[in-house]
Image (tube, coloured by chain):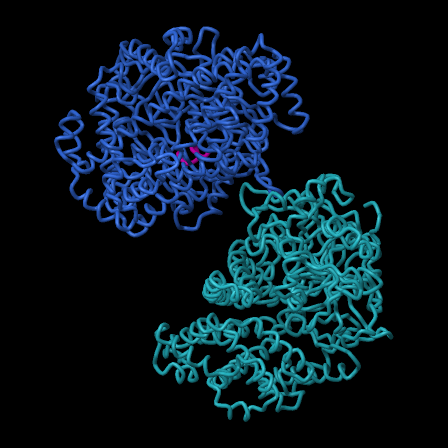
Chain colours: A cyan, B blue
Amino acid sequence: MNHRILAFALGLLAVSGGAMAVEGKWTPSQILELDPQWLHAQGLEVAPETLWSRDGGGLLEAAVRISGCSAGFISARGLLITNHHCAFSILQQHSTPQRDLITDGFLARTPAEELPGSGSRATIPHRVTDVTAEVEAAVPAGADDLARFQAIERKKKELVAACERQESRRCEVATFDGGVRYLLNESLEYPDVRLVYAPPRAVGEYGGEVDNWSWPRHTGDFALLRVYAAPDGRPAARADGNVPYPPKHSFPVAARGVEPDGFVMLVGYPGRTFRSFTAAEMAERAELYYPGLSALYRAWLDLMEAASAKDETARIALADRIKGLENNEKNARGQVAGIRRGHILERKAGSEREILAWAARHQDQAAGAVAAHDELARRVAERRCTWDRDFLLDRMKQGPKPLDLALTLVRWAGEKAKPDIEREPDYQERNRDILRERLERDQKRMHLPTDAALLTDVLARLAALPAAPADSRVPAVEAFVGGTRDRAALRPRVDDLLSHTQVTDLAERKKMFDESAEQLQARHDPLLDLAFGLDAELKALKERNDRFEGAVSRLRPRWQRAVIAHAGKPVAPDANGTLRLTLAHVQGYSPRDGVWMRPQTTVGGVVEKHTGEEPFAVPPALLAAAPQAPRSRWADPKLKDVPVNFLADADTTGGNSGSPVLNGRGEVVGVNFDRVWENVANDFGYDPGVARNVSVDVRYLLWMLETLKGEAARPLLEEMGMAGKAP
Amino acid sequence: MNHRILAFALGLLAVSGGAMAVEGKWTPSQILELDPQWLHAQGLEVAPETLWSRDGGGLLEAAVRISGCSAGFISARGLLITNHHCAFSILQQHSTPQRDLITDGFLARTPAEELPGSGSRATIPHRVTDVTAEVEAAVPAGADDLARFQAIERKKKELVAACERQESRRCEVATFDGGVRYLLNESLEYPDVRLVYAPPRAVGEYGGEVDNWSWPRHTGDFALLRVYAAPDGRPAARADGNVPYPPKHSFPVAARGVEPDGFVMLVGYPGRTFRSFTAAEMAERAELYYPGLSALYRAWLDLMEAASAKDETARIALADRIKGLENNEKNARGQVAGIRRGHILERKAGSEREILAWAARHQDQAAGAVAAHDELARRVAERRCTWDRDFLLDRMKQGPKPLDLALTLVRWAGEKAKPDIEREPDYQERNRDILRERLERDQKRMHLPTDAALLTDVLARLAALPAAPADSRVPAVEAFVGGTRDRAALRPRVDDLLSHTQVTDLAERKKMFDESAEQLQARHDPLLDLAFGLDAELKALKERNDRFEGAVSRLRPRWQRAVIAHAGKPVAPDANGTLRLTLAHVQGYSPRDGVWMRPQTTVGGVVEKHTGEEPFAVPPALLAAAPQAPRSRWADPKLKDVPVNFLADADTTGGNSGSPVLNGRGEVVGVNFDRVWENVANDFGYDPGVARNVSVDVRYLLWMLETLKGEAARPLLEEMGMAGKAP
């Protein structure tokens, strides 16, 4: 088996004449299934068992999760490296008009100055247990797909609940490829995380949305955090007596950096990919989901951006909502373009035909695979009948914030009345504090005139749904609009509703959070009333989706086992938020005929892009220091300048933000923060020609600290082992 | 001297490690001053004397001028290769809604089908005579700068008139570097030029304004024309008895094409560059002229584009006016950016300081140079006082077409009353037919509602000029606006004017062309009245400019001789519309940190850009043929596809459009059609890092003819020596 991988890799080498493209977000244990000689030929200089031992655990455990991002320990005193955008919420919490940390950046000169982040939690891997048999056994004989889904969910919750009865545990059952395997991931959750260093926004977000998902890139998307623990090392709520957490493993920082064709590996928690999807499921994404998402978010963004341009209060309130939507909108467009460019649907359909033919000939290795595939295709086709309505209902919480809050309150009131084990996961007791914090934090993110426009938009879209052939109308919306389908005529009704609701009042909302559904109903709050109606639709939608997921859990594993058997070699499972390693090489790419993207950018390039206007306004201190960068100890000898960002062909996705990028010795050479636009559809298939992730070179961070922060940064550089060390 | 050039070139080679950058638009006779061994090392495979003999004349004479473009003979039967955009006006003349040659392209299957182009003239070089002494001798002792200018102009006209008394001669006295030399260029003008082949606009303008001035490029900007002559070979007006003109020289077509680092040379008629400008003159361009031009044309384009978007008639009428303005506007922006990027002002000032210091020490070689430099700087400074008014007056003919026509009629009426020799060159008898044709042709280019908006804009800008400190108000405008300075209030006055003028009526305009100034005044046509007032301003402006030019003709040669003496090697003079050769190598470039532009694009790249919408709508036949391109005989073995466009570091400017691109054997490998955006400021200084011109590969033309036109194109391919010839 390992020889086949080697032959495959050598074949690629022969074709590309250079560094090898290495597809796969490998689970830690899969690393041990790969040929060690092949890994060495790739550039791995340490024994694979150093990364992950046969008993579980190893250097890779130095990679942790934080705020939906990845991060990595880089000192024995709990220092974490991650992205600027992953630490952004802490900057936001501590920023005031008088002390604008977002704009200025932040450096703690002493441990006492480090800034606690409310809601930021470091999730540190602890133990992994295979629970596949237990989960499968929980499904009663003869269960239909809904019952099957519910039984699996219940079992997963029971396993999580039992796990979390241990102190400070954060547990989850991760599903691999729709149910091929279920693993119970046990983590320790440290809620006392503090900001140590973040660059000015103009560095951390340099290029902003203009450069997002693109290359060449010049973004200092890095930040340093520190995890604190109780004096005995256990997780503890923020307290003055807490001490820096001493991690089991940490990554040394490499001062030497990367160079073209050099081997790198990324470790982190990629969120979700869809490579095990069948062609029918991919077509649904490519033809309905992403184009719909792009159009809807674009419309909302237009409203929000117009408000921000006119009004400073709106700009501040909407900043990170806009950022989130923009990111998703650009991603959606990239998915559509990338799926087309990479002929991903056609390739998927082709390989599926091949596997179907193979499976028909190898019933011993692929029992029921063909039937499973065909049934899955039928279930997907059924979803098209009410696609527009279901899509709008599913997305509406991402638009008008008051509606989002009301829907959360209503659902929470309903769910909390149930026994914990029967609740939806997001509304279980373990998430109570997260929910409450979010309801509070969102007060800063509301801008009523804009939210009125967004709510009008959502209702107008729902009111415009057809009554035939499939009745897509939503009773709660029909009741509210009272036959008014005209957008302009709806707006006064929405304004009236928002002027009478108390959901937008923080104090009242805190009270509502503790009330029962009956108490909420008794308020006769017009927004809560609307939310109750919409919540009923969401529940019905959820039931349809749950039934579909039940079918998937029954069908996909059968099919996917045939796919793996047909491959005859390790197949990396789809990303599912669990710890993964991807192997890569630093290299450029050609996005289109006539253009070659070089794999590295420099401080000189940062200055070259400087216009003085956002998002290309380099802070004066950096601008002044840049001419000396080529003579600093962090300058790359070949580039003759301090490197800023680099490209590699790593197999990444969302959730890999903040992933430490390691060299062959397991030392940190950078932090991953993005993919190039052409590579967004990578979630559906790996295309070696354009599969490029974007990382910030750790030498840019070191140069900035040393050059711009001077003495104040010396303790930090010492902690990273970089004080006075020549690269 | 030649050793210094060689050493200089080898120095460059050492720095770049590859192909050499070769600055200079050499005059034909300068080629013989360059070291033949160095030319050979560059890649020239024929003797320099083949290109241009010591007696004058040679292969380079196969390059001719047509419609402001360059072109090259490529057969013994008068076949010319040039750009699509240089043949565009012939396509436009013959296009009707029923027979849309612009959209469909055109191929003459027989000589009888070739389409005559009214107003298209092929200007073929015949003889060059140095007249410097004669011109200088014409200036009377003690003449002030205006008298000096007028004396020189008069002498030039006399020389031209004497020259043109020979049959079918087109003559001009070309001024080199402000007056270092004056050469009388004698050409033969062939007015019977016919269109043989043009691709569809979607090929010839592929990428349109989006790709204009940029790379990567995929434009089939080529066309084939044929020059006809009387049976005895002499120039003759279009007549059925004319025969194909047999040129003295023609360029063979090379089927082998170009490859990276390959040597190429461009021959053509570059229009105007400004490298001999002093720092003060360059600053005027960089700080006032180009920013002003960009802002003004952008405003006019906004008006014209809005009209075109709403109205199909407007779109057709305004198409080439928009194209012209867009080109100029983008150019102006590029000049500003390129001058900044290349630090051209700083470098010029630096080299000027060096030469000033050298000149002060070498009075024997640079007598009066320092004083000349300083006086020139003072004269330039004076022009700033009334810059805004003078700039608007100078540019207004490029905006509203009715005003342009009226100003031309008024000026023509005034000038034609003078003896021919005293007239402004554009209004001499020899240009009567050109003027009349333009007045007729422009009827198609008018769109009254848009022209009303443009005229309002011009008048509003003039009315907004300050009355102090320098009085910039224009009496004719003040009279018309009657104190109304508000743009909206002006519009009804302009509409009223346009509804009462007869200038926009073609029949009346033809009559006006033959009337005297008194007759025009007697018409009491409101637009003519306004034009008379503005014409008086233009005359006063012209006198100020003439005086300045007189000073330049006195001062620049003194300074420039010092510059040349200081260089101690051949210095190519600024482009002035005369025949030049530039040496180059095919090579890519880095427009910015992290990006490398490869030097060639392919048919695959054409398809890759196809969106189905203009300017990226590939014609269906090409789209269908493209997949087979890699297997055609025109495919490049390394690119594995038919090449489309290529980059070289040739030293080009406007007027080089249509320049044949030759290989080291003097064979045509392509046709130049553009420069990259980063290279626009090349007119002020050559920057080897970004000095790149864009050419279409002749193999794209050959492939299109053979693949898309089949049998119909066989005679043409045979004429080019390409029928059945393997590359």
Magenta stretch, residue numbers: B700-705
Most foreground residue, B415 or A233: B415
Give the percent coordinates (x, y) of residue B283: 50, 31
Most foreground residue, B552 or A484: B552
Give the percent coordinates (x, y) of residue A199: 68, 56
Q: Is residue A579 left or right of residue B585?
A: right
Most foreground residue, A388 or A139: A388
The vertical placement of A150 against A212, above or below, is: below
Q: Is residue A527 left or right of residue A699?
A: left
From where the camera sits, is residue B475 visible? Answer: yes
Give the percent coordinates (x, y) of residue A6: 74, 52
Q: Residue furthest right?
A: A232
The vertical placement of B434 against A513, above or below, is: above
B121 inside magenta stretch: no
Determine the image quadrant of residue B712: top left
The secondary structure that dominates the magenta segment is helix
Determine the image quadrant of residue B389: top left
Q: Is residue B117 left or right of residue B651?
A: left
Q: Residue at x 82, y 69 (%)?
A: A245
Give the percent coordinates (x, y) of residue B420: 24, 15
- The image quadrant where one finds the N terminus of chain B is top right
Determine the image quadrant of residue B541: top left
